Amino acid sequence: MKPVILIPTYNESIAIVELLNSLATLHNQRDFDVLVIDDNSPDKTADIVDNFELPWIKVLRRPDKAGLGAAYRAGFAEVLKSDQYTHVVTMDADGSHRVEDLPMMLDAVHASDISITLGTRWIKGGSVVNWPISRKLLSRAGTAYARIALRIPLHDLTGGFRVYSVTLLRRLNLSEMTATGYCFQIEMAMASNLAGASAVEVPITFVERINGVSKMSNSIVIEAIWQTTLWGLVRALRPNADKLHYVK
Ligand SMILES: Nc1nc2c(ncn2[C@@H]2O[C@H](COP(=O)(O)OP(=O)(O)OP(=O)(O)O)[C@@H](O)[C@H]2O)c(=O)[nH]1
Ligand SMILES: [Mg+2]
């Protein structure tokens, strides 16, 4: 197994240093690469990453802030140019996804070629630290709505701590994906489900960010609601159409 960890960043100059330091400790025991996808952060996050000068850490520099989904799609396209990886990990830069949970996620990956592993907050053993009740409710309601509307039998559809097999990613029409905000996570879960991926859920502890500023906004929540509703309607009315759309 040779994973590459994709980390999207926008103004994460403090948090990214902590995260890369933790990953460097883990790198003494496990082999993986890191690709930070930075949207020209004014706080020079990309330069800070380059200053690590480690051969296994790279930065993909993008010209403008274009949202989480666009950043991940660019990251997927970049890593799929090479044949050296078996799995792609997605991880937030802000410390919410703990490096200490990563070995457990990697060890849990399903043996099947086409697989998705989800770090899940809302199953036994999972938890969220320092979130107000309103944010917990929003996240749980978002997953519950997507679960019912899209008929995906998973318990954390908006979380972004995941491991995709490269074979799965190569099966997906990534260029057909449109979601910008965190409904990108829902879109990827739906596409993986349509591609017949074996799914494993691993309980994780999600920690509210300590440094930096959240990019979460009302427009991201609204995008998730209307997109999920639209995808749900399409799945109900034309069950095979979206499979053709998302799966090669
Ligand atoms: N490249 C890039 N990264 C982004 C963009 N928006 C968010 N990110 C990164 O995506 C990750 C998740 O964003 P957050 O702002 O933490 O959003 P969130 O986790 O949904 O919300 P919080 O719980 O409030 O932190 C972080 O590493 C961000 O820096 C973007 O437009 N471009
Ligand atoms: Mg966050």
Image (spheres, rainbow, N blue to C red):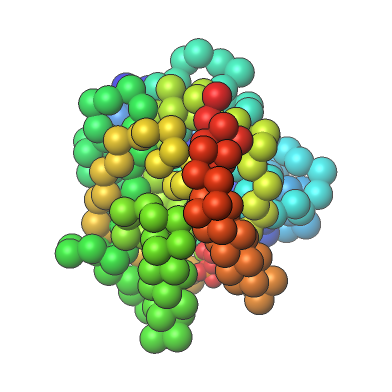
The percent coordinates of residue 166 (x first, y second) are 45, 25
Q: Residue 69 or 130: which is nearer the viewer?
A: 69
Residue shown at the point (32%, 54%) measured from the top left: 154
| Residue 81 picture location, percent across and down | 61, 18
Q: Which quadrant holds residue 63?
A: top right
Identify the image quadrant of the N terminus.
top left
Q: Which residue lies at the image location 25% right of the left edge and 50% below the top edge?
A: 202
Give the residue drawn at x 73%, y 38%: 61
Residue 145 lies in quadrant: bottom left
From the top left corner, tell me how far across and down residue 121 is, in percent. 31, 63
| Percent of width and height locating residue 123 | 23, 63
Which residue lies at the image location 53% right of the left edge and 30% below the top edge? 247
Quarter holding the C terminus is: top right
Residue 72 falls in which quadrant of the image?
Answer: top right
Side (left or right) of 192 relative to 36: left
Q: Tell me if residue 234 can be seen.
A: yes
Tell me: residue 75, above or below residue 18. Answer: above
